Image (spheres, rainbow, N blue to C red):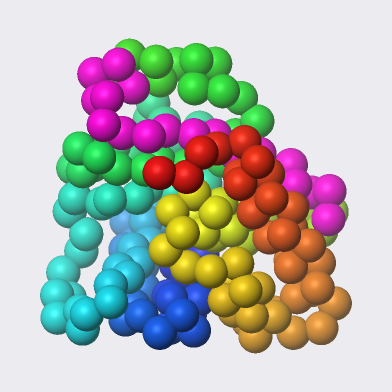
Amino acid sequence: MVTAAELLALAAFRDGKEAQAFPSFGSERTGAPVTAFCRINAQPIRSREPVYHPDVLLIQDSTLLHQVDVFGGLAESAFVLINSARDIDALHLTDFVTCHPGVQMHTLPASDLALKHLGRPFANIGMVAGYAALTGEVSKASVNQSITEKFPGRIGELNGAVAAEVYDFVAANLARV
């Protein structure tokens, strides 16, 4: 998610917006949950604090849904995008959605689509493209440019294919609000 936050910030800059991206690490061990933040705004961003009430939440690992308080502080009208081929009911999130009617929660098979193109289930690029398609905060073109800048050559091309398919998937399956 650290790379995803950096790519979102870079795409936002390309679109003429202000952005910050920064990670927050808990216990320093392999496999520990990692949180990364990205602020995007048309105006200068003066805050350097962690994000306590996110408007958008990207969850790359759905196994954390019932292990960690991933929804803590979530804004009342937030977007949630979860990397999973399963739907909200199968993830046992129906009660949360019912209790938080302003939250728009969606799933996206980002790992599956990355596996198809890259041969590895890296969800970060898919989550960035999904965010762009869902919110319209950053453009598809800026996401693609950010990917090819961060990952030059063949890896960038393959990641670009992941981003394009995810963007089209989200645009076709989820109504942008």
Quarter of image, res 128: bottom right
Q: Residue at x 32, y 81 (%)?
A: 18
Q: Front-most of 55 and 2?
A: 55
Q: Residue at x 62, y 36 (%)?
A: 173
Q: Residue at x 46, y 59 (%)?
A: 136
**Chain part drawn in magenta:** 97-117
Magenta span has 98? yes
Residue 146, horizontal then vertical, whole percent: 59, 79
Residue 91, horizontal then vertical, whole percent: 50, 21
Magenta span has 51? no
In-image side of 46 versus 113 (left or right): left
Quarter of image, res 94: top left
Q: Residue at x 49, y 49 (%)?
A: 134
Residue 73, horizontal then vertical, whole percent: 18, 42
Q: Front-most of 139 and 60?
A: 139
In-image side of 77 versus 6 (left or right): left
Vertical placement of residue 79 versus 164, above or below: above
Q: Front-most of 10 and 35?
A: 10
Query: Can the viewer see residue 20 in this picture?
Result: no
Residue 85, horizontal then vertical, whole percent: 65, 30
